[in-house]
Amino acid sequence: MPGGPVPTTGSTGRHRPRSYPAAAERAGGGRVVEMMAGAILWIALIAVLFGLLALFLGTTRRMSVLIARTRDLEQVQRSVESIDIRLAAVTDPLVARLDELRRRTGDPQALARELDPAQATLQDLAAETRALRLPEILAGQAAVMVHETERAVRAAALVEHGLQAMLAARGNRELEAQTSLKRGALNLRHAREAFGRAAAEVAAMQPADVARQPGDGLGGSVPMPPPVPGEPRDQDLDGSFEPRM
């Protein structure tokens, strides 16, 4: 019959109608499942891409931080090395001249002429050391270097006092002069050696060591530390403390 269900023949030979709505429903359900599977696949793919992008950005940021800290550390190491070289260039000749004076073979007037520029250089080195910004992991070395450059400045002042007493041409000041010169030489030598040890530790620092610390890796301007426990104190002019020779 036109417009009616198309008869089919079963195993019994009878005709039964075919169900078009049920077939369409099954076909539509299959398409929905396929669409959902495709959507899930796309979502998973996008999530993977976002994860890779985040990993790339994180790695890039860590590399940028490492490169920046490496550059900062190398700059600090160059600055410390420069200060160490200039400190040795000032203190070593002074100590040698003072040893000559103690052996009565030196020229106090020549040393007095050399002392003024040496003191100015030491003061500049102390100011330069205070202005350094070292990584926090090197805070101990920074404190030592500041302390020792300041110590060298005070030692040079002791030398100046001793020379003034020696050149005053008054016999009763000979002991005062020798004491001040000896203490000045001792403190200059100790300051030079302690700064050199701290500078060597700074030079041995690796970028990976700095990269392991939090923050930007750099501290603020180094403050003036208290005297290091256990080391000989800087000598006063009143002769109240005799250092170990």
Image (cartoon, grey):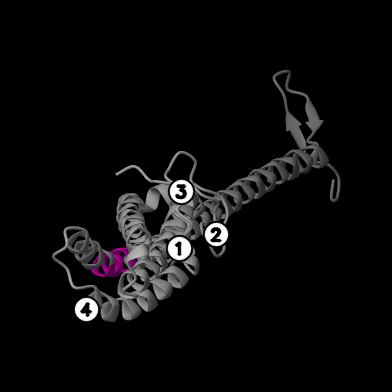
Q: Secondary structure at mark 1?
A: helix
Q: What is the CA distance from the residue labelled 1 to the residue labelled 4?
A: 24 Å
Image: 4 above or below 143? above
Q: Which residues are magenta?
A: 80-90
Q: Which residue is mark 3?
A: 233
Task: Tell me the number on the disc at residue 110.
Answer: 4
In the depicted view, which residue is nearer to us: 141 or 182? 182
In the depicted view, which residue is nearer to us: 225 or 58? 225
Q: Are marks 1 and 2 in contact (CB under 8 Å)?
A: yes
Say whether residue 200 is magenta: no
Q: Secondary structure at mark 3?
A: loop
Q: Whole-percent x and y of residue 216?
A: 54, 59
In the depicted view, which residue is nearer to us: 45 or 72? 72
Amino acid type, mark 3: Arg
Say whether residue 89 is magenta: yes
Task: Tell me the number on the disc at residue 224.
Answer: 2
Residue 40 horizontal side relative to residue 86, left or right: right
Amino acid type, mark 2: Met
Task: Tell me the number on the disc at residue 150.
Answer: 1
Amino acid type, mark 4: Ala
Amino acid type, mark 1: Glu
Mark toward the start of the polypeptide (2 vs 3): 2
Residue 204 horizontal side relative to residue 8, left or right: left
Q: Whole-percent x and y of residue 104?
A: 16, 62
Examine the rendering and report whether any part of residue 53 can be seen. yes
Q: What is the CA distance from the residue labelled 4 to the residue labelled 2?
A: 33 Å
Q: What is the CA distance from the residue labelled 3 to the residue labelled 1?
A: 12 Å
Q: What is the CA distance from the residue labelled 1 to the residue labelled 2?
A: 9 Å
Mark toward the start of the polypeptide (4 vs 2): 4
Mark toward the start of the polypeptide (1 vs 2): 1
Q: Badge 4, how many Cα within 10 Å: few under 14, some, many 20+?
A: few
Q: Nearer the viewer, mark 4 or mark 2?
A: 4
